[in-house]
Image (cartoon, grey):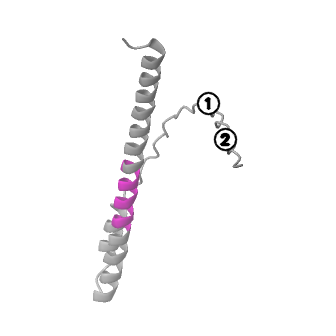
Amino acid sequence: MSISYKKEAIEALRAAKRLARAAERSALEAAEIEKAAKKMASDARIAEKMSRILGETDSVATAASEAVPEPEPEPEPIVEEKPAAKKKAAPKKKAKAKKS
């Protein structure tokens, strides 16, 4: 037989874990989007440099720079903070027995 406050504590921990996982997923997705945007911008710069080296027109450079989408800012998930748990008092040390 379980005690109700233990069940409630377990449910609260599970809910906190779900929120933490969701925050991690959104952070990873945002990092991937940012990484893709940086790669596209880098590719556009390289294409522009190559077109200048080869003496081509600037149409390639403008087309590459227009293809870079701006990532949409995602709202950060709200993470509930738990109150700090009270620490248990350390047990007292026993005095050593005196040798006679």
The structure residue drawn at horizontal position 38% and vertical position 67%, both measured from the top left corner, is: 41
Element type where label 2 sits in the image: loop
Element type where label 1 sits in the image: loop
Q: Which residues are magenta?
A: 29-41
Q: Is residue 64 above or below residue 11?
A: below
Q: Report if residue 37 lies within the magenta region.
A: yes
Tell me the amino acid under the disc marked 2.
Lys
Along the horizontal axis of the image, is 31 left or right of 63?
A: right
Tell me the amino acid under the disc marked 1.
Pro
Identify the image quadrant of residue 44: bottom left
The structure residue drawn at horizontal position 33% and vertical position 60%, both measured from the top left corner, is: 67
The structure residue drawn at horizontal position 66% and vertical position 40%, both measured from the top left corner, is: 94
Q: Is residue 39 above or below residue 7?
A: below
Q: Report if residue 46 lies within the magenta region.
A: no
Residue 64: give x, y in percent of width and height.
Answer: 32, 67
Frontmost of labels 2 and 1 is: 2
Q: Nearer the viewer, residue 69 or 91?
A: 91
* Residue corresponding to mark 1: 83
Q: Nearer the viewer, residue 48 or 28?
A: 28
* Residue corresponding to mark 2: 93
Residue 85: give x, y in percent of width and height.
Answer: 60, 31
Image quadrant in which the N terminus is located: top left
Residue 49: give x, y in percent of width and height.
Answer: 35, 81
Q: How many neighbours does mark 2 have within 10 angstroms: few (below 14), some (14-19), or many (20 or more)? A: few
Q: Earlier in the sequence, mark 2 or mark 1?
A: 1
Q: CA distance from mark 2 to mark 1?
A: 30 Å
Q: Is residue 43 above or below residue 33?
A: below
Q: Please, which residue is most extreme toward the front here? A: 100
Magenta portion: prevailing SS class: helix
Residue 48: give x, y in percent of width and height.
Answer: 35, 77
